[in-house]
Amino acid sequence: MSQSNWLRETDRHQMPEIRRFTYPSALKFFIRYPIFLLGFGPPIFRSQTVDATTGVTDFWSVLQIGWLTLITLRAIYRLLAAQQILIPKQIRAIFRLTFFLGLLFLISVAYSPSRLVSAAYAVFYFLTLICVIEFVADAYQDPPIWVECLFHLRFIALFLFLAVVLVLPFSPQSVMMGAPGLGIRFLGGSLAPMPVICPIIAIISAYTFLHSLESRTRAAFFFFVGLGATLATQLRGAEIALLVALLLIAMDWARTGRHAAYMVIFGLMASLVLGSVLVGGIGGERIWNIFNKGQNTEGIQSASGRTEIWNYVIQYCISYPQGMGYVAGFRMLFKNYFSLTSAVVASRIGNTHNTFLQYLADAGWAALVIYLIMLAKVLALGFRVAAKRTPVSFDLDSTSRHALRCTLVLLIYFLVEGVDISDFAAPLRIPFFLQNIAIAIILGVSARIIAASRIRPT
């Protein structure tokens, strides 16, 4: 059977399911596409942080490594068992960049202060890359119902959120952090990164609500759960990134029709009026203090001390363009530079609080450039494919594009939030897995639509 006939047959076979938007069993879905299992982490129920720079591990670290290894072995088996692996050349170019980035991480092991730890994290990076490649290759030939990928991604976020809520009454100190003048921050601790999973719930629910992809009552409920939990984190980076993502969703929805455009314009005008009323009633200075958590001018200008860390990384990499060594390098060098005691939690001072500068610290300027080019290619491919019309069925084409557009918004959220946190650059961290899952969905949908665009209408 030719590729075009095979594509038509598989798409026609899936079309009735797409129209009904039925949910397969969650267990069946995760077994069929195990890359989504990486999104669970799994959650770590520990009260103390293990210092990865010393190579010290515990039961939860072993569980994480075993979880990733089993999923990767399954992916390797399916790749080896496949008769042929079909991936469009645009996506192969992106995979080559991610592979070269991994090679830089391996090279950085040679000058890392903790070679064993850097080598281990480089292996974890490649294991995750294998899972992404297997999903894209599999989805190219036997795709999922793409919209359901969004629902299951939200299910993962809701599961992690529920785990944090259940732990809260028994061990509040493990999921919340208090600071003088900043109040209580609902961060999730080692169980789940609340600044990442809560916005995922809000973004997917907002998109499905506006495009009527599920019950609007359910979508609205989940949206306010995600929005409220995001505000409870009291992190300006998460709040700003979520605002950017919601504006992108609203602008995309406004393009679907005149009524939608009028609704968006009315909403923006109402927001301006409401904002003016709040400023007049409460006072601009008071609102500014609330948004900045009562910080002084020095704290605001330094981004809560982050600029000092960023300046240290840039100055170091100007002198040593190759970076510090993957993951472990910054943690050890930064601790020694500021003469920090071992009592300081390693995970809080052991990263740059910026995903992009973390790649710079890990493997130098070359790693940062390759990472930026890779992200630019993923976004460019996604937006270009989302705007392309294909001769395949309208139902299939529409649902694929909904999944693609919503996932692009999720990736943009990760990038904006990445200015504030560096967990997207650290293997074995839930944000790292979630960003790779989002990239895998974008590449998978794009590969499918690219293949469909090559079919000439008969």
Image (cartoon, rainbow, N blue to C red):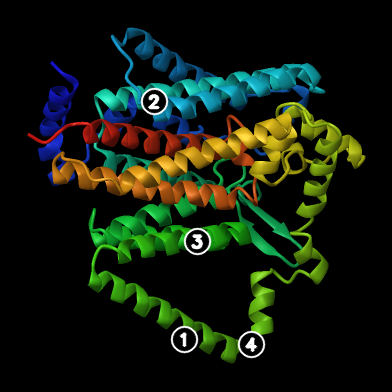
Say if mark 1 contacts mark 2, CB within 8 Å.
no
Inter-mark Cα distance, 1 to 2? 49 Å
- Please report whichever mark, 3 or 4, sits nearer to the chain's N-terminal start: 3
For the residue pair 247 and 338, the one nearer the viewer reads as 247
Mark 2: which amino acid?
Answer: Lys
* Residue that numbered label 4 is attached to: 283
Of residues 265 and 276, the one nearer the viewer is 265
Q: Quadrant of the N terminus?
A: top left
Q: Residues within 10 Å of mark 3 (few under 14, many from 20)?
A: some
User: Which numbered dot is residue 265?
Assistant: none
User: Which mark is in front, 4 or 2?
Assistant: 2
Q: Quadrant of residue 28?
A: top left
Name the N-terminal-most of marks 4 and 1: 1
Residue 232 visible somewhere in the drawing:
yes
Q: Of the numbered discs in the image, which one, if any, rests on residue 244?
A: 3
Q: CA distance from mark 4 to mark 1?
A: 15 Å
Q: Quadrant of residue 278?
A: bottom right
Q: Quadrant of residue 76?
A: top left
Q: Amino acid at mark 1?
A: Val
